[in-house]
Amino acid sequence: MISSLKEGVKKYFYRLTNFSDRNTRLISVILALAVTLTLLVYNYTLVKMNQEHINFYVLDPYKRAENYPEVLVVGKNNTCRLWIVVENYMEQKIKGKVFLKVADRPVSTIPVPIEANVSYDVEVESGRSWENQVEIVIEKTGRFTLVFELWVFNEEARRLEFYHFIVFPIDVIEA
Protein backbone atom coordinates (compact mmCIF):
# COMPACT_ATOMS: atom_id res chain seq x y z
CA MET A 1 0.00 0.00 0.00
CA ILE A 2 2.83 2.42 0.84
CA SER A 3 4.60 1.56 -2.37
CA SER A 4 1.43 2.29 -4.39
CA LEU A 5 1.11 5.67 -2.62
CA LYS A 6 4.73 6.46 -3.45
CA GLU A 7 4.09 5.46 -7.07
CA GLY A 8 1.04 7.75 -7.22
CA VAL A 9 2.99 10.72 -5.81
CA LYS A 10 5.84 10.07 -8.24
CA LYS A 11 3.39 9.94 -11.16
CA TYR A 12 1.72 13.16 -10.03
CA PHE A 13 5.00 15.06 -9.83
CA TYR A 14 6.18 13.55 -13.11
CA ARG A 15 2.98 14.73 -14.78
CA LEU A 16 3.27 18.09 -13.01
CA THR A 17 6.76 18.67 -14.35
CA ASN A 18 5.81 17.58 -17.85
CA PHE A 19 2.30 19.09 -17.83
CA SER A 20 1.17 16.08 -19.80
CA ASP A 21 -2.16 15.68 -18.06
CA ARG A 22 -4.97 18.26 -18.27
CA ASN A 23 -6.12 17.63 -14.65
CA THR A 24 -2.60 18.14 -13.35
CA ARG A 25 -2.41 21.54 -15.03
CA LEU A 26 -5.81 22.52 -13.65
CA ILE A 27 -4.88 21.54 -10.09
CA SER A 28 -1.59 23.42 -10.41
CA VAL A 29 -3.33 26.59 -11.58
CA ILE A 30 -5.89 26.35 -8.76
CA LEU A 31 -3.11 25.90 -6.17
CA ALA A 32 -1.16 28.84 -7.59
CA LEU A 33 -4.28 31.05 -7.50
CA ALA A 34 -5.06 29.99 -3.93
CA VAL A 35 -1.55 30.85 -2.75
CA THR A 36 -1.58 34.18 -4.61
CA LEU A 37 -5.00 35.13 -3.25
CA THR A 38 -3.93 34.24 0.29
CA LEU A 39 -0.84 36.45 0.00
CA LEU A 40 -2.85 39.33 -1.47
CA VAL A 41 -5.42 39.21 1.34
CA TYR A 42 -2.66 39.02 3.96
CA ASN A 43 -0.82 42.02 2.48
CA TYR A 44 -4.02 44.05 2.18
CA THR A 45 -4.98 43.51 5.82
CA LEU A 46 -1.43 44.20 6.97
CA VAL A 47 -1.25 47.48 5.03
CA LYS A 48 -4.78 48.46 6.08
CA MET A 49 -3.91 48.02 9.75
CA ASN A 50 -0.78 50.15 9.40
CA GLN A 51 -2.71 52.98 7.74
CA GLU A 52 -4.77 53.75 10.84
CA HIS A 53 -3.18 56.69 12.61
CA ILE A 54 -3.69 60.17 13.98
CA ASN A 55 -1.70 63.13 12.65
CA PHE A 56 -0.88 65.81 15.20
CA TYR A 57 0.98 68.95 14.23
CA VAL A 58 1.37 72.66 14.90
CA LEU A 59 1.49 75.27 12.12
CA ASP A 60 2.51 78.93 11.92
CA PRO A 61 -0.14 81.73 11.75
CA TYR A 62 -0.47 81.18 7.98
CA LYS A 63 -1.13 77.44 8.42
CA ARG A 64 2.28 76.45 7.10
CA ALA A 65 5.14 74.57 8.71
CA GLU A 66 7.63 77.39 8.11
CA ASN A 67 7.81 80.57 10.16
CA TYR A 68 7.65 79.39 13.75
CA PRO A 69 8.51 82.12 16.25
CA GLU A 70 11.90 81.61 17.87
CA VAL A 71 12.33 84.94 19.70
CA LEU A 72 9.67 87.10 21.34
CA VAL A 73 10.25 90.64 22.69
CA VAL A 74 8.55 91.66 25.95
CA GLY A 75 6.37 94.72 25.47
CA LYS A 76 6.64 94.71 21.67
CA ASN A 77 6.06 91.26 20.26
CA ASN A 78 5.51 88.79 23.07
CA THR A 79 2.51 87.08 21.46
CA CYS A 80 2.88 83.80 19.63
CA ARG A 81 0.05 82.66 17.32
CA LEU A 82 -0.05 79.06 16.13
CA TRP A 83 -2.52 76.53 14.74
CA ILE A 84 -3.02 73.12 16.36
CA VAL A 85 -4.22 70.41 13.95
CA VAL A 86 -5.41 66.86 14.67
CA GLU A 87 -6.27 64.60 11.70
CA ASN A 88 -8.12 61.34 12.32
CA TYR A 89 -7.24 58.40 10.06
CA MET A 90 -8.65 55.81 12.45
CA GLU A 91 -11.73 53.72 11.67
CA GLN A 92 -13.75 55.41 14.42
CA LYS A 93 -14.31 58.85 15.94
CA ILE A 94 -11.66 59.94 18.43
CA LYS A 95 -12.09 62.06 21.54
CA GLY A 96 -9.33 63.57 23.57
CA LYS A 97 -7.53 66.67 24.75
CA VAL A 98 -4.63 68.81 23.64
CA PHE A 99 -2.67 70.26 26.55
CA LEU A 100 -0.52 73.35 26.01
CA LYS A 101 2.24 73.64 28.60
CA VAL A 102 4.77 76.45 28.88
CA ALA A 103 7.88 75.25 30.69
CA ASP A 104 10.52 77.68 31.94
CA ARG A 105 13.25 75.03 31.86
CA PRO A 106 14.39 72.40 29.36
CA VAL A 107 12.07 69.44 28.96
CA SER A 108 13.59 66.12 30.01
CA THR A 109 10.55 63.84 30.22
CA ILE A 110 7.45 63.43 28.10
CA PRO A 111 4.65 63.85 29.03
CA VAL A 112 5.86 66.93 30.90
CA PRO A 113 4.93 66.68 34.59
CA ILE A 114 3.60 70.25 34.97
CA GLU A 115 0.12 71.72 34.91
CA ALA A 116 -1.21 72.68 31.49
CA ASN A 117 -1.60 76.41 30.87
CA VAL A 118 -4.54 75.66 28.56
CA SER A 119 -6.39 72.54 27.43
CA TYR A 120 -8.59 72.01 24.39
CA ASP A 121 -11.26 69.34 23.97
CA VAL A 122 -10.85 67.43 20.72
CA GLU A 123 -13.52 65.34 18.97
CA VAL A 124 -12.79 64.25 15.40
CA GLU A 125 -14.82 61.98 13.12
CA SER A 126 -13.01 59.38 11.03
CA GLY A 127 -11.42 60.99 7.97
CA ARG A 128 -11.85 64.54 9.35
CA SER A 129 -9.60 67.08 11.04
CA TRP A 130 -9.81 69.45 14.01
CA GLU A 131 -8.07 72.85 13.97
CA ASN A 132 -7.73 75.51 16.61
CA GLN A 133 -5.74 78.74 16.59
CA VAL A 134 -3.93 79.46 19.84
CA GLU A 135 -2.44 82.69 21.11
CA ILE A 136 0.35 82.42 23.65
CA VAL A 137 1.53 85.50 25.54
CA ILE A 138 4.71 85.31 27.63
CA GLU A 139 5.27 88.30 29.94
CA LYS A 140 8.74 87.55 31.36
CA THR A 141 12.16 87.07 29.80
CA GLY A 142 13.96 83.77 29.57
CA ARG A 143 14.21 80.58 27.59
CA PHE A 144 10.90 78.70 27.42
CA THR A 145 9.64 75.47 25.93
CA LEU A 146 6.16 75.25 24.43
CA VAL A 147 4.86 71.71 24.77
CA PHE A 148 1.76 70.50 22.95
CA GLU A 149 0.53 67.10 24.16
CA LEU A 150 -2.22 65.06 22.51
CA TRP A 151 -4.10 62.70 24.82
CA VAL A 152 -6.69 60.34 23.30
CA PHE A 153 -9.59 58.81 25.24
CA ASN A 154 -9.37 55.00 25.42
CA GLU A 155 -12.95 53.66 25.44
CA GLU A 156 -11.99 50.27 26.91
CA ALA A 157 -9.87 51.67 29.75
CA ARG A 158 -12.26 54.65 30.18
CA ARG A 159 -9.38 57.14 30.51
CA LEU A 160 -7.18 59.55 28.58
CA GLU A 161 -3.91 58.09 27.30
CA PHE A 162 -0.87 59.99 26.10
CA TYR A 163 -0.54 59.78 22.30
CA HIS A 164 1.94 62.31 20.90
CA PHE A 165 3.77 65.57 21.61
CA ILE A 166 5.36 68.57 19.89
CA VAL A 167 8.02 70.77 21.49
CA PHE A 168 9.05 74.32 20.49
CA PRO A 169 11.89 76.18 22.21
CA ILE A 170 11.35 79.93 22.38
CA ASP A 171 13.42 82.82 23.77
CA VAL A 172 11.79 85.89 25.29
CA ILE A 173 14.02 88.97 25.52
CA GLU A 174 13.76 92.61 26.72
CA ALA A 175 13.08 95.34 24.18
Image: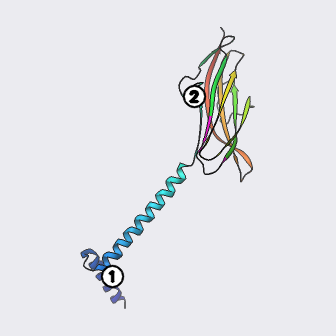
- As shown in the figure, which amino acid type bears the numbered disc 2? Lys
Residue displayed at 59% across by 20% down: 70
From the viewer's perspective, tell me whether residue 8 is left or right of residue 104: left
Provide the residue designation for mark 1.
9
Depth check, front residue: 103 or 109 = 103
Provide the residue designation for mark 2.
63
Residue displayed at 44% across by 62% down: 39
Depth check, front residue: 4 or 62 = 62
Q: Residue furthest bottom?
A: 1
Place residue 84 in its image quadrant.
top right
Determine whether label 1 and label 2 are within 8 Å by CB: no
* Relative image position of residue 133 (x, y in whole percent): 66, 28
Q: Mark 1 or mark 2, which is nearer to you?
A: 2
From the viewer's perspective, tell me whether residue 128 is left or right of residue 160: left
* Relative image position of residue 151 (x, y in whole percent): 68, 41
Badge number at residue 56: none
Residue displayed at 37% across by 69% down: 32
Is residue 153 within the magenta segment?
no
* Relative image position of residue 114 (x, y in whole percent): 73, 31
Place residue 99 in its image quadrant.
top right
Depth check, front residue: 120 or 124 = 124
Q: Secondary structure at mark 1?
A: helix
Q: Is residue 8 above or below residue 27?
A: below
Which quadrant of the figure contains the C terminus?
Answer: top right
- As shown in the figure, which amino acid type bears the numbered disc 1? Val
Chain-order first, disc 1 or disc 2: 1
Is residue 91 within the magenta segment?
yes
Q: Which residues are magenta?
A: 85-93
Place residue 85 in its image quadrant.
top right
Depth check, front residue: 107 or 86 = 86
* Relative image position of residue 1 (x, y in whole percent): 37, 91
